[in-house]
Amino acid sequence: VGVLVVGVVLVVLVLVRVDVLVDVVVLVDVDVLVVVVLVEVQVVVVVQKM
């Protein structure tokens, strides 16, 4: 189950990164980028604790 969760998380992070790249290209709010980075850091911390 752990491996499956990590796999899903990685896929989500990749999709989020693509969205962020698109947003940056389109010059969308920097706030969105900051929130995404914070969420990504939290996810990594949670995965490491598992």
Image (cartoon, helix red, strand yellow):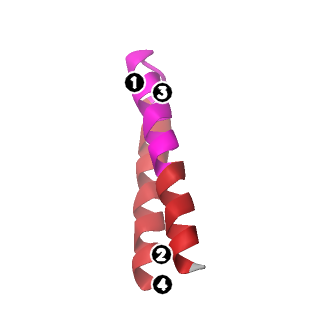
Amino acid type shown at disc 2: Val
**Which of marks 3 and 1 precedes in the sequence?**
1
Q: Are marks 1 and 3 in contact (CB under 8 Å)?
A: no
Q: Is residue 28 magenta?
A: yes
Residue 31 visible to an observer of this rendering: no
* Residue nearer the viewer, 32 or 19: 19
For residue 41, which quarter of the picture? bottom left
What SS does tag 3 mark? loop
Residue pictured at 50% horizontal, 32% vertical: 19
Alpha carbon distance from label 1 to label 3: 8 Å
| Residue 3 place in picture, x, y as percent | 51, 74
* Residue nearer the viewer, 29 or 19: 19
Q: Are marks 2 and 4 in contact (CB under 8 Å)?
A: yes
* Residue nearer the viewer, 11 or 37: 11
| Residue 48 place in picture, x, y as percent | 39, 78
**Which of marks 2 and 3 precedes in the sequence?**
3
Amino acid type shown at disc 1: Val
Q: Are marks 4 and 1 in contact (CB under 8 Å)?
A: no
Q: Are marks 3 and 4 in contact (CB under 8 Å)?
A: no
Circle 2 residue: 46
Alpha carbon distance from label 3 to label 2: 27 Å
